[in-house]
Image (tube, grey):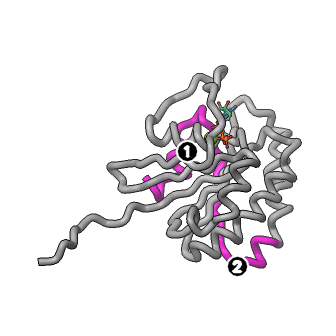
Amino acid sequence: MSNETNQEEPIKVVIMGLENAGKTTIVDVLTQKIRYDQLTPPDMYPTKNVERTTLIEKNTVVWDFGGQELYRNEYLTDPENYLRFTSFAYYVADVQDYYRLYSSTMYFMTVFPIIIRNSPDAKMIILFHKMDPTYDPSKKELKKKFLDQIESFIESHKTSIEIFDTTIFDIKSITTAFSRVL
Ligand SMILES: Nc1nc2c(ncn2[C@@H]2O[C@H](COP(=O)(O)OP(=O)(O)OP(=O)(O)O)[C@@H](O)[C@H]2O)c(=O)[nH]1
Ligand SMILES: [Mg+2]
């Protein structure tokens, strides 16, 4: 008799992006299906290093990468350990953070090739997050600028990327973006 079980390896989902982009809040929505009040987004603490959350019934583990520079430097020096066996890689860009648009595109262009190198079959998804119902439409320019900046980079990697607009004030926007995972 072998000791083999039918238990499959969990599906690994990674969520990356700059600090304050909203990654942990998104994981909270996925695990608790919280509906937030439009005027009061929750107070959250910055994530230290990487937090793993298991979506038990889906056999999925979500790796939420703390976006503060300290943690970014830590896991990017040992990316293999953190990014191998990824099935879905989400990059969260904060559409309300106009001043860090450039930093966010730069970080995206840093992590994207590292993910591909460590998990060549990973599905890549960008979330343009904090697209709140009250968000000034004229600022939607930021999404276009982000995409313009990464366009030739993406083409050179010959990998397709899915794109979603999300906000915690519309749970469906988040469950839709994660529909292939959930
Ligand atoms: N307006 C708005 N605020 C949001 C949204 N999602 C998250 N936030 C707020 O953004 C702030 C940062 O959220 P976090 O989820 O902690 O951000 P993070 O990306 O996990 O940050 P690090 O852990 O430091 O990498 C919190 O105050 C959240 O309430 C959203 O869709 N709209
Ligand atoms: Mg966090």
Q: Is mark 2 within 8 Å of ligand 1?
A: no
Residue 142 visible? The answer is yes
Toward the viewer: 116 or 49?
49
Q: Secondary structure at mark 2?
A: loop
Q: Quadrant of residue 98?
A: top right
Q: Quadrant of residue 75?
A: bottom right
Residue at x 41% of width, y 55% of height: 60
Q: Position of residue 63 (x, y in %)?
A: 53, 53
Residue 110, relative to residue 127: is it above or below?
below
Q: Secondary structure at mark 1?
A: helix
* Picture quadrant of ligand 2: top right
Q: Is residue 43 magenta?
A: no
Residue at x 53% of width, y 37% of height: 171
Magenta residue span: 153-182
Is 76 left or right of 31, judged from the image as shown? Answer: right
Q: How many marks?
A: 2
Toward the viewer: 100 or 3?
3
Q: Which residue of the protein is positioned furthest toward the left in this rendering?
A: 1
Which residue carries the number 1 mark? 174
Residue at x 58% of width, y 49% of height: 50
Q: Is residue 165 magenta?
A: yes
Q: Residue 158 has which mark?
A: 2
Q: Is the residue marked by circle 1 packed among few (<14), some (14-19), or many (20+) residues within 10 Å?
A: many
Q: Amino acid at mark 2?
A: Lys
Question: Do labels 2 and 1 touch, CB within 8 Å?
Answer: no
> Cα distance, mark 2 to mark 1?
26 Å
Is 74 left or right of 97, judged from the image as shown? Answer: left
Q: Position of residue 13 (x, y in %)?
A: 51, 58
Q: Is the residue marked by circle 2 packed among few (<14), some (14-19), or many (20+) residues within 10 Å?
A: few
Q: Amino acid at mark 1?
A: Ile
Toward the viewer: 5 or 181?
5
